[in-house]
Image: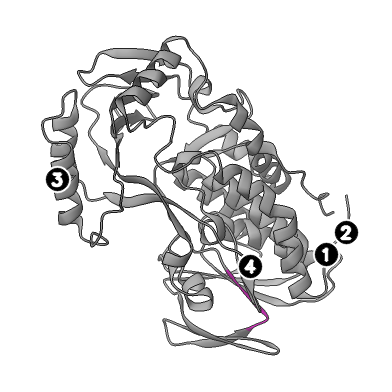
Amino acid sequence: MTSPTHPSTETVLISGASIAGPTLAYWLHRYGFEVTIVEKARTPRGGGYPIDVRGTAIEVVRRMGVLPRLQAANLHIERFTFVDADGVTVASLPPHEVTGSVVSQDLEMGRGDLTAALYAAVRDDVEFLFDDSIDTFEERDDGVDVEFRSGSRRRFDLVIGADGMHSRTRRLQFGAEEQFHRYLGYAFGVFTMPNTLGLSHELTLWNTPGRAAALYATGSSEDVLYAFVNFHRSEPPRGLHGDRDAQRALISEIYAQAGWEIPAILRAMQDAEDLFFDTAGQIRMPSWSKGRVALVGDAAYAPSFLTGQGSSLAIVGAYMLAASLGGNQDHAAAFRAYERDTRDFVTRNQALVDTGGAPLFPITASALEQRNTALRGQVAMPPSAGEPAHSALTLPVEIS
């Protein structure tokens, strides 16, 4: 255990109150920084699809004191069932044999359960500005002048973007997203629908080459289902951002004439008010900082949902950034240390998937048959060679 080595009360503005933002705020406060978080949502965000906390991230949340709460929220999914084009069962396995997770250690929970726990851990110690966002900022020698959407203006010593894969902070300081975005060959949609099948604590995944659909019951048979569609496209679909009708039309076209429960999924999608659509991609940047501005989590190094490591990278990255700032008097040296000590961990986790090569979503008939043969033989998926990436970083010692 060590004491904070950063004696100043520097002010830090964090954009984003989801996962990386509150985690970073917690540790910066421990190091003596004065922290403000700005979040465009009106309240802490609840709900959301299930996410994982795995490997090194488990130790971070333990050090934050929120591990018992997250363990209580663990979904305890009992099985993953794979079905073919006609809905015939290929294999039904325990989840850890599919995801590579560590039984009794790694966790899966609703996104809202994680964000609520992180918010509760820090809400009394830092300033939150909800229903607001950064409009513009101007960096000066001694700070960053920030103008908020609300019209207010303030100066901070540092600005940290924790505002997701489509980060506005990144765009303002580093330029257009396109130069950092790596498309992985898939587009996806997720929404909730009635649990007409009576599923309970299980996931059923349907595949044909280049198309997948899943029904995910995170609770009992009376709860709603998460419906998920994921399909391969050699080029990302264009012009769909914010256009729900166009998104629904594209998904309906791609899954037309498909069997199993696909017709019911498509009908439910037409009425779903919570449809979220995006492409599977990663953010890869040559540097995560510039001047007095740095990025953390998906804003800096989104690994994509295909790795199952987005939340864990956000948590670990936030801890490492805070430790670097707390241990260095100069912010430029701190940002260099953050990148030096964290980049290999990020690179290993991003390397868990490649373009069009996600093990659970084969894009050719031969790859699908190979995967199904492995599943029938109960060979763990994804390959075990990727598992060390989840824990491939030793955290700095915990501050007292």
Q: CA distance from mark 3 to mark 4?
A: 41 Å
Counting residues from the N terminus, which is met first, the one under dot 1 or under dot 2? 2
Tell me if mark 1 has few (under 14), some (14-19) or many (20+) residues whose alpha carbon lies within 10 angstroms of its own: some
Counting residues from the N terminus, which is met first, the one under dot 1 or under dot 3? 3
Tell me which amino acid carries mark 4.
Answer: Val
> Exactly how many numbered labels are in the figure?
4
| Dots 3, 4 in contact, CB < 8 A | no
Query: Badge 3 is on which residue?
Result: 270
From what the image shows, is residue 257 above or below residue 285?
Answer: above
Q: Residue 187: x and y, percent?
A: 31, 46
Counting residues from the N terminus, which is met first, the one under dot 1 or under dot 4? 4
The quarter of the displayed image where residue 5 is located: bottom right
Query: Badge 4 is on which residue?
Result: 126
- In this view, the mark in front (1 or 4): 1
Query: Badge 2 is on which residue?
Result: 3
Counting residues from the N terminus, which is met first, the one under dot 3 or under dot 4? 4
Tell me which amino acid carries mark 2.
Answer: Ser
Q: Nearer the viewer, residue 20 or 280?
A: 280
